[in-house]
Amino acid sequence: QLVDKNPDQLWLYFMTYLNEKPQLKVSIHGFYTQTYTETESYRGSNGTYQTHVVTRSRLVTEFYFSIDLSPYICEQWGRVAVIPSAKARIAGETVTLRDALEQYTLSNKKIKEIVLEKQCHGWDLEELKKKIIALVRSTGYQNGINVAYNRVNYQIAARSSSKLSQFANSTVVRVLCCISCLCIIFGPIYYCLRTIGSARNTIVAEYMMMESDDIFLQLNAEMIVNSVIQRSILI
């Protein structure tokens, strides 16, 4: 394919999917650990059945809901940059976008892959997580809280069109590798090949957030507080 050998065609391929901005959601989960006992039966050494009490624990969800952050992400990417590999940084090398594309297209490896990652800029997501937890705590909630981000459509991957590459990246191979004994033998080989074939440098496209995270919290604080108080579970 032209994408495998031509850096201009590879860039056009990336451009096609860059028009679709990444999707981002934040999930807020409140829970506690419940301890309970169960009676189990087992056969003793003398052949008779006996019982004993086993103590177990499980997570109990008190509230769970998500907020879509995608409307706050700009529709158009701002810039594309290359993050050099560790080896290139140590050597003090400057890697341009053209360099990164040509490294992939000039490679003769049967299994090769280059990934462009879509990143959202403008918000400190870890700081926002702390603010959300503080808001939940302000309701008097004292149990466990987990705030997590779910990203969708945030990577564009180009892979070699060789039959070996298609085989290595097939869903069937991945499933077999995970659920069968082949994982012991084929798993390390599979991941080694994927690692060797991956591009050394990271290409990122930046999408700016159109509002500040403080404005997001102001607009959604009431909904978050009400969902916690009402113990909403929306999955």
Image (cartoon, grey):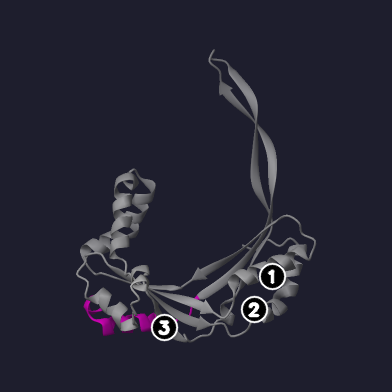
Query: In this picture, is 73 found above or below 62?
Result: below
Q: CA distance from mark 3 to mark 2?
A: 23 Å
Is 87 rendered above or below residue 29?
A: below
Q: Are marks 1 and 3 in contact (CB under 8 Å)?
A: no
Q: Earlier in the sequence, mark 2 or mark 1?
A: 1
Distance (Cα) linking label 2 and label 1:
10 Å
Tag 2 secondary structure:
helix
Which quarter shows the N terminus? bottom left
Residue placed most toward the observer, 149 or 46: 149
Tell me residue 228's x, y (percent). 74, 64
Does the residue at mark 2 contact the one at mark 1 (Cβ under 8 Å)?
yes
Residue plotted at (73% across, 74% down): 221
Residue occupying the point 63% across, 71% down: 127
Please name the amino acid that badge 2 sits on. Asp
The residue where tag 2 is placed is 213
Q: Which residues are magenta?
A: 1-22
Whole-angstrom CA distance, mark 1 to mark 3, is 30 Å
Q: Tell me the amino acid under the disc marked 3.
A: Val
Residue sitting nearer the eye, 79 or 23: 79
Residue 131 is labelled as 1
User: Which residue is the site of mark 3?
Assistant: 80
